[in-house]
């Protein structure tokens, strides 16, 4: 039963693919204002009081997601108030925006303002 | 050396000193006494160890800080309990303090239920008079609205919540430096508050003892970690002419002190969890340490201002 025959391998592969699809769908469902055509993940990890990567380049219309990996709450706030600010993100909480018009957007954590980052949006 | 049992009246292998030694890690706070305009501080552990009433003074009050109610990560999974223990220590003091000051971060995430828990636990404290300043954790999503509604009832809060009060000839100034922070910057008082401060102290005689308290240190403890206030120099400029100025802060969860002219700066320990010493870790934040290590770290340093001395004495107290 547990022998990895070519048929079993194929089934396992299909199962794996469908699980991946399911998780992508679930993720998409949480992001209400995200365009489904843009599936590229631009993820910024918040760790050790820093945004990583500190500068990220994305295409207009793509989504950008921050995830907080610290035991300390952080926020994501546009310096020039160019996009909606996050609420305080507790450990493992995420925040997603959709990149707007091309340009350079700087942001910071309003709780720990030493933490700054930049999003470069290209056409 | 101090861990040997010296008095075992109950023949149970525990002496008073050892018991207090063991318990001392759990709750931390500083007792401040003012006698003749000179401030002195003791850790709660020292008070418990001494087991004697405080010397007669004009005024004594207690600083607690950074209770972070709602925090439940590895650095301390039960911050409510350690907060309770800190309050038990206050209740056990032979001479109760006149009042408490809490130097901010009452809660972890500014949630109403966290403030509720804080208030509920605080009810067990015999000392009912409490003066607050907010930490950045108390003003996360609403600019401090909820905090101000709850914790400024007994004072005349101005602007984002700063105020003053007088006790026994001492002028207390509560400042807010955790709001409207600027990208790349530190804690901030802002023009409006600074102008208020300048006017507030203008009419006071230089012999008036001044106590200033705010959450983020009003001196550059470690700006790389945001441990400082960008416009604190201006505030201190207004206080330079006074003979005795004491600045009490929280935020960094460890005792540090500095004397500059007539100004003495102190930061208090947390009742919740330690943070690394400046520059000793990748970043600030809750520091996970083994329980035994935690005990040895909290209450590690106490500070004493001795009457008649202008320079404060720093006393290291290893509580393990």
Image: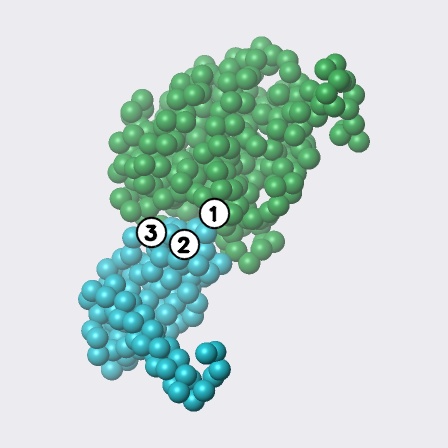
Chain colours: A cyan, B green
Q: Secondary structure at mark 3?
A: loop
Residue A73, placed above or below residue B295: below
Label drawn at residue B73: 1
**In this orientation, does residue A64 appear?**
no
Question: In what quadrant of the picture does the N terminus of chain B appear?
Answer: top right
Badge 3 vs badge 1, beta-carbon distance below 8 Å: no
Residue B94: give x, y in percent of width and height: 57, 13
Discs 2, 1 touching: Cβ within 8 Å: yes
Q: Nearer the viewer, mark 3 or mark 1?
A: 1
Of all residues, the one furthest to the top in this rendering is B56
Q: Residue at x 67, y 25 (%)?
A: B19
Check disc 3: other Cα within 10 Å, few if <14, some if 14-19, many if 20+.
many
- Secondary structure beneath dot 2 equals loop
From the viewer's perspective, is residue B291 above or below residue B29?
Answer: below
Q: Residue at x 66, y 18 (%)?
A: B50
Chain hosting mark 3: A
| Residue for point 26% across, 31% down | B149
Residue A88 circle label:
3
Q: Would residue B38 appear left or right of B135 to someone viewing this image?
A: right
Label 3 to label 1, Cα distance in Å?
17 Å
Tell how many labels.
3
Indicate the chain on which mark 1 is placed.
Answer: B
């Amino acid at each position: 039963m547990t022998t990895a025959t070519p048929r079993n391998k194929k089934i396992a592969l299909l199962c794996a693919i469908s699980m991946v699809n399911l998780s992508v769908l679930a993720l998409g469902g949480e992001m209400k204002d995200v365009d489904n055509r843009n599936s590229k993940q631009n993820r910024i990890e918040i760790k050790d009081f820093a945004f990583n990567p500190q500068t990220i380049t994305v295409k207009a219309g793509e989504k950008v997601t921050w995830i907080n990996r610290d035991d300390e709450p952080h926020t994501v706030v546009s310096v020039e108030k160019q996009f909606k600010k996050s609420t305080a993100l507790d450990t493992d909480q995420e925040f997603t925006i959709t990149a707007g018009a091309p340009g350079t957007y700087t942001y910071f954590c309003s709780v720990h303002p030493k933490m700054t980052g930049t999003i470069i949006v290209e056409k | 050396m101090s861990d040997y049992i010296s008095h075992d009246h109950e023949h149970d292998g525990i002496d008073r000193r050892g018991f207090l030694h063991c318990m001392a890690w759990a709750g931390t706070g500083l007792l401040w006494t003012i006698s003749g305009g000179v401030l002195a501080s003791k850790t709660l552990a020292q008070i418990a160890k001494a087991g004697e009433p405080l010397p007669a003074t004009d005024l004594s009050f207690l600083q607690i800080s950074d209770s972070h109610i709602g925090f439940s990560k590895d650095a301390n999974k039960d911050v409510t309990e350690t907060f309770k223990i800190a309050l038990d220590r206050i209740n056990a003091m032979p001479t109760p303090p006149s009042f408490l000051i809490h130097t901010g971060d009452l809660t972890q995430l500014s949630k109403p239920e966290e403030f509720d828990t804080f208030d509920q636990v605080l009810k067990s404290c015999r000392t009912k008079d409490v003066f607050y300043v907010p930490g950045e954790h108390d003003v996360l999503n609403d600019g401090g609205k909820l905090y101000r509604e709850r914790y400024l009832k007994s004072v005349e809060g101005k602007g984002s919540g700063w105020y003053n009060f007088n006790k026994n000839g001492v002028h207390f100034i509560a400042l807010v430096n955790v709001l409207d922070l600027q990208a790349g910057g530190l804690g901030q008082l802002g023009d409006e508050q600074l102008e208020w401060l300048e006017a507030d102290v203008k009419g006071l005689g230089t012999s008036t003892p001044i106590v200033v308290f705010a959450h983020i240190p009003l001196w550059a403890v470690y700006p790389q970690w945001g441990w400082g206030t960008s416009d604190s120099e201006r505030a201190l400029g207004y206080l330079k002419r006074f003979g005795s100025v004491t600045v009490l802060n929280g935020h960094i969860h460890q005792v540090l002190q500095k004397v500059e002219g007539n100004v003495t700066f102190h930061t208090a320990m947390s009742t919740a969890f330690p943070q690394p010493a400046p520059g000793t870790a990748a970043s600030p934040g809750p520091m996970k340490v083994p329980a035994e290590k935690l005990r040895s770290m909290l209450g590690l340093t106490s500070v004493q201002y001795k009457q008649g001395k202008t320079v404060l004495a720093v006393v290291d107290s290893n509580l393990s």
